[in-house]
Image: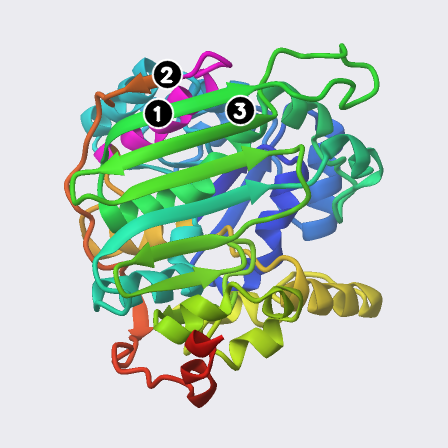
Amino acid sequence: MKIAIVGCGFVFDIYMRTIRAHPELEVVGVFDKSSERMKSVCTYYGFHSYQSIAEMLDDPEVEIVVNLTNIGSHYEVSRQALEAGKHVYSEKPLTKSLDQSRELFAIAEERRVRLYCAPSNIYSDTVRTIASAVAHGAIGKPLLVYAELDDSPIRLAGFENVFSRTGAPWPLYEEVREGCTYEHLGYHLVWICALFGPAVSVTAFSAELVGHKAKGLPAKVGTPDYSVANLYFSNGTAARITCSVVAPRDHRMRVIGEEGEISAAGYRRYRTPVRLERFTRGSLSARKLEVFQRHPILGSLFGVGGRRIPLSRNWKSEAVERDQQIRSTSQQRVIDWVRRRQVYAQDKFVGVAEMAREICEGKPQYLSPEFLLHLNELTLLTQNAGPQGVAVTPTTTFAPLGPIPGTFRRQPSLTTFRQRPLERLVPRL
């Protein structure tokens, strides 16, 4: 399908890291209110530029508008595109108001077009593997989810010196003013709610803990840099999600069940290894020994942390396995090779690809409007909870989504792991 992109900032170049993995998507043009940014992007990638949003929306070739503007512009840009009869894929959060989000979906229904929203990490092989293992009983009945999104002390990270491939600065002031909850909570909400359904109760807290996060801004900007959301689901599962730009980087994903735990180190590498631990007396007792806490590899011999399991694959797995950019120097290819294996390997375009496939094949919207509204509401509740906290019942809900589409290889039986020989020794200590 033919797409046009609004917003040529830092995230634009992150999307473009995997563009060659999606030949079914043709970028017919871009627009940015900064003519300088638009010129840089078009010169680098060879894209056509529009002189206004109106010109872009008047182009009959444009089928999907990808909204990569700043958060405060999401609603207005998406509204204009929907009213022009274009499908829309928006960066998160959809809007900063649940009423505005409902309005956008109403317009989409009236115009018979579709509205989708990031994040796309639900389509990663890591999330697919976790979802499949939980669904097939690898950990027994799921009881508890711990999801971390501490993203390092923002004031110490040196982001003012970070620029994208086309020279866009890292959006430091936007990140500080809008806060880590708007920016990050969705990465965990999307997979947790997809697995366990709508939250039936929420207890949340948010606060601004650190001052002087960026030069030129007030000491405190009034936006939380720390938040925690506790969710309860109708199947009896509870989840706790923590976001901050205060603590060092920690993106762990853990699902604990009656019989074991499945975990991954984070969401930003779409093929992050997944580990499964089937609880035994030995592995649980081994956790008490300090030597195993200091030396995880040694602890794994006694069952601590479980074992790596084969990752699922999907129709777009290769997007994060090799260089997919339009242009790369030898130095950039080396840096990107290390980044993909150690730090960051997201395919942000996969959400647009899944959207286009559903439209072309006439399939229902997997991430349903009701699902996206629920994520939007949970994000807003957590962002606005404040230091006094809130305990509320969400007003939105959605029908279960079912298995994640596009998975090629599903998991073998994971319920028959054998106990390691050394695990039998630890209960005696």
Helix, strand or loop at label 2? It is strand
Q: Point out the residue furthest to the front here.
A: 428
Q: Residue 227, how many percent across, how many down?
A: 51, 27
State the residue at coordinates (49%, 31%): 56
Dots 1 and 3: beta carbons under 8 Å?
A: no
Q: Point out the residue furthest to the bottom here.
A: 421
Q: N-terminal of the two: label 1 or label 3?
A: 3
Q: Quadrant of residue 119?
A: top left
Q: Which residue is mark 3?
A: 71
Crowding at mark 3 (Cα within 10 Å: few <14, some 14-19, many 20+): many
Measure how far apart labels 2 and 1 are at the Cα level.
6 Å
Dots 2 and 1: beta carbons under 8 Å?
A: yes
State the residue at coordinates (67%, 39%): 10
Closest to the observer: 256 or 162?
A: 256
Q: Amino acid at mark 1?
A: Thr
Closest to the observer: 386 or 398?
A: 386
Q: Which residue is mark 1?
A: 203
Measure how far apart labels 3 and 2 are at the Cα level.
24 Å
Q: Residue 123, how many percent across, how many down?
A: 39, 57
Q: N-terminal of the two: label 3 or label 2?
A: 3
Question: Against 317, is 68 above or below?
Answer: above
**Residue 155 lies within the magenta run:** no
Q: Quadrant of residue 189?
A: top left
Helix, strand or loop at label 1? It is strand
Q: Residue 223, how many percent across, how many down?
A: 59, 16
Q: Residue 124, how many percent across, how many down?
A: 43, 60
Q: Amino acid at mark 3?
A: Ile
Q: Which residue is mark 2?
A: 390
Residues in magenta, as a range? 370-389
Question: Against 307, is 252 above or below?
Answer: above
